[in-house]
Image (tube, rainbow, N blue to C red):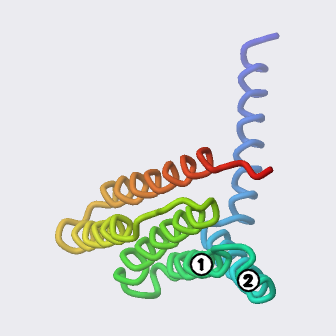
């Protein structure tokens, strides 16, 4: 095959690929995804909260899990409103609420598996992340540092959750 035919075919494939990706990004922009995440987390929180009222105390932690879903919904909604609300709400508060929701889910998993998750280390983690976000938003604006802070603190909580689930007693 001549070189100019191969080159034009590759250019054609790249052009089509770029157009397809652009079209998909138009359908699924970040604001739409954030809105969908806020609505779905809110609906999940309401559903779990209603189930918690029906089953009362038979399943430990259901009400707490519903509150965590509500926190996630609030965090996604605040992130969705970025650019319309001040940075304190859309950066500092949104990420703090999101991390607090993950911490609440960890405590719920611990309660569900009859393990103990101490409250104060989790509170201190969330407060220290809030302080770090205040610092890296207002004193020394640094987006990458904020990403590292939220990613590492969330990873710690998710690893603790995984450990809790792996060490849970298997019923039966």
Mark number displayed over residue 84: none
Front position in the image: 87 or 126: 126
Residue drawn at x 47%, y 56% is: 157
The residue pinned by badge 1 equals 64
* Residue lying at 43% horizontally and 52% vertically, measured from the top left: 156
Counting residues from the N terminus, which is met first, the one under dot 2 or under dot 1?
2
Neighbourhood count class around disc 1 (C-alpha, 10 Å): few under 14, some 14–19, many 20 upward? many
- Residue 13 relative to residue 125: left or right: right
Image quadrant where residue 64 sits: bottom right
Near-viewer residue (119 or 35): 119
- Residue extending farthest top: 1
**Residue 36 percent location from the top left of the image:** 70, 74
- Where disc 2 sits, the SS reads helix
State left or right for residue 150 relative to residue 18.
left
Residue found at the very far front of the displayed protein? 172
Q: Quadrant of the N terminus?
A: top right
Residue 52's tag is: 2
**Is 171 placed left or right of 67 in the picture?**
right
Say which element carries label 1. Answer: helix
Can you name the residue that lies furthest to the left here? 139
Is mark 2 in CB contact (under 8 Å) with mark 1? no
**Percent position (x, y) of residue 148?**
36, 53
Question: Is 14 rendered above or below residue 139?
Answer: above
Residue ID at (77%, 35%): 12
Q: Residue at x 35, y 72 (%)?
A: 123
Place residue 92 in its image quadrant. Answer: bottom left
């Amino acid at each position: 095959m001549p070189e100019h035919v191969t080159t034009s075919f590759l250019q054609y494939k790249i052009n089509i690929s770029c157009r397809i990706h652009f079209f998909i990004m138009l359908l699924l922009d970040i604001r739409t995804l954030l809105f969908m995440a806020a609505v779905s987390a809110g609906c999940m929180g309401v559903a779990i909260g209603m189930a918690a009222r029906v089953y009362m105390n038979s399943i430990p932690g259901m009400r707490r899990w519903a509150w965590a879903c509500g926190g996630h919904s609030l965090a996604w909604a605040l992130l969705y409103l970025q650019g319309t609300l001040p940075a304190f709400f859309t950066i500092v508060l949104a990420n703090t609420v999101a991390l607090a929701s993950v911490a609440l889910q960890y405590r719920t998993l611990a309660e569900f598996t009859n393990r103990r998750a101490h409250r104060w280390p989790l509170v201190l983690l969330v407060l220290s992340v809030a302080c770090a976000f205040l610092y890296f938003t207002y004193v020394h604006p640094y987006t990458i540092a904020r990403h590292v802070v939220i990613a590492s603190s969330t990873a710690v909580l998710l690893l603790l959750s995984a450990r809790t689930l792996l060490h849970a007693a298997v019923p039966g």
